[in-house]
Amino acid sequence: MATTQNTYTGNGSLTEYSFTFPYLEESDVRVSLDGVDQATTAYSFANATTISFNTAPANGVAIRIYRQTAQDAPPATFFAGSAIRASDLNENFLQQLYVAQETDQIARNLTAGDIAPGGITNVQLADDAVTTAKIADLNVTTAKINDSAVTSAKIADGTIVNADVNASAAIAGTKVSPDFGSQNIATTGNVSGDNITATGDITATGDATITGDATIGSLNGGQLAGTRNRIINGDMRIDQRNAGASVTQTTAVNFVTDRFSCSGNVASKFTAQRSTVAPAGFTNSLAVTSSSAYSVGSSEYFILRHIIEGFNCADLAWGTADAKPVVLSFKVRSSLTGTFGGSLFNSALNRNYAFSYTISAADTWTDISIPIAGDTSGTWLTDSGAGLYINWSMGTGSTYSVAPGSWGTSTVFSATGATSVVGTNGATFYITGVQLEVGSVATPFERRSYGQELALCQRYYEKQAVTLYSGALPLPYFNAVSMRATPTITGGGAGFIAANASPRYALMYQSGQATQTLEFSIEL
């Protein structure tokens, strides 16, 4: 194959470049930089086979030195009776040879970019002129194919196989006939994938068999099964102690609604109570109101808390290699907006997980869902002790705040930079629909009957009006349910005695007959 061009890449310093092809005249030698022909004033001939640029081509510039033989007229013209010299014949022959060689080089240099859109039409191509061997892989893109240009008639049966479809091709259902966007998908084989999502209903007339895990938001628009929720009284209906009365936060643990308490290491910074302000489908929430505009110190904290008994979270297998993930979900609203925080930790306070969530609109109920990886370290009680603490921060200093989203070893109440409810006088915070369940997708709030929820609460606290009698023999009182452990009993009158107390009953009497409101407490 004859050479009609030489190519180089500029380096910013070299000015002379040689070429290896023969030519008839210096004017037949052309020079281009990045595809642009240069004027003859930009370079000169250092010798018969070397071009010298006035200025060195820049680094990375594509240099092409090529021959373009003049073909307007032959170098020599013969007239009748004139002498024919061999040199003239040779020069005429070389002109034709060089032009033919240059035409061949142009054809080999031709790329898709050299053809104007529509320049080559079907009419100009012979049948089978373009074969797959003539098209480099990936050269034909979607943009190069006219809409509806490729029809089923143009594709031979069996021509496109699985191997021809890129794994990331992302072929939309509407591009497939029948249109998966409007037609049913029927198969005698398996339907599988990392994630199968349907925005509508999935209907099976026969059995649906799932051999792996199924992550389902709801079944028939409701909960999937009973006792998924490890939280007791998550909808705040039960309030045996206070019946909706306000509770002032102190440095001690004060229960607001059953199983939900408030505390802080500086007293009287907020009040809390059961409220009837609630989202659709709920009747109650736990409401917090800030008592002042308090600047939280670095080592101070103010929280709402729920503790899950070890028996009720033992199956999570936390502290082992088989630890299960959970998702914490709840409904929340506040007069404040921003990022809020909370935490989970064990009874030893040496395994913690800070979480954060966002309230974007003031005084608007927001659904929160927080997936949490199961902890494979630490000791997590699986008996009647405190298995898992969950805290919602109303304001926490830097000492007890860390970045959210991972397990750590210190005592933590909130995520770093979280909004402080106690920092704004009169600020409000409401929460309800609290649920903790195994998995990574929150399901609808699990609703139990009032009687079921009350009985679950009475394992830890019971408040009853009891008629006590005077006399030598005490009378037995049986608790509504067997309590977590032997409770502390308070509320009797003068000479009140509770003997042989147990988690199930106690023997009681007092000096004079009277009806007393007794409290049985064995909170975590």
Image: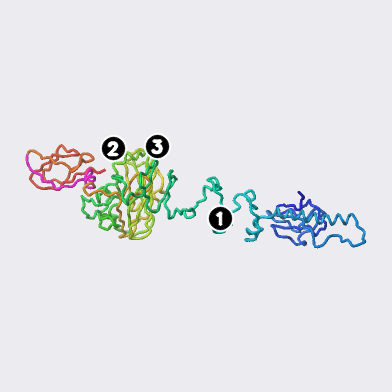
What residue lies at 20% left-to-right and 42% top-to-bottom? Answer: 481
Query: The residue tagged with tag 3: helix, strand or loop?
Result: loop
Residue 400, position as x, y percentages in the image: 37, 48
Find disc 3 in the rendering and name its residue: 321
* Crowd around label 1: few <14 · some 14–19 · many ≥20 (10 Å): few
Q: In the image, what residue type sits under mark 1?
A: Val
In the rendered structure, the answer to whether residue 283 lies left or right of residue 441 reads left
Query: Which of label 3 and label 1 is nearer to you?
Result: 1
Find disc 2 in the rendering and name its residue: 383
Q: Which residues are magenta?
A: 453-471
Q: Earlier in the sequence, mark 3 or mark 1?
A: 1
* Crowd around label 3: few <14 · some 14–19 · many ≥20 (10 Å): few
Write down the quadrant of residue 409 in the picture: top left
Residue 206, position as x, y percentages in the image: 35, 45
Query: The residue tagged with tag 2: helix, strand or loop?
Result: loop
* Crowd around label 2: few <14 · some 14–19 · many ≥20 (10 Å): few
* Alpha carbon separation for disc pair 3 and 1: 54 Å
Query: The residue tagged with tag 1: helix, strand or loop?
Result: loop
**Which of 138 and 66 lies nearest the eye of the viewer?**
138
Q: Earlier in the sequence, mark 3 or mark 2?
A: 3
What residue lies at 84% left-to-right and 57% top-to-bottom? Answer: 92
- What number is the disc on residue 166? none
Q: In the image, what residue type sits under mark 3?
A: Ala
**Which of 321 and 441 lies nearest the eye of the viewer?**
441
- What number is the disc on residue 150? 1
Identify the colour scheme used: rainbow
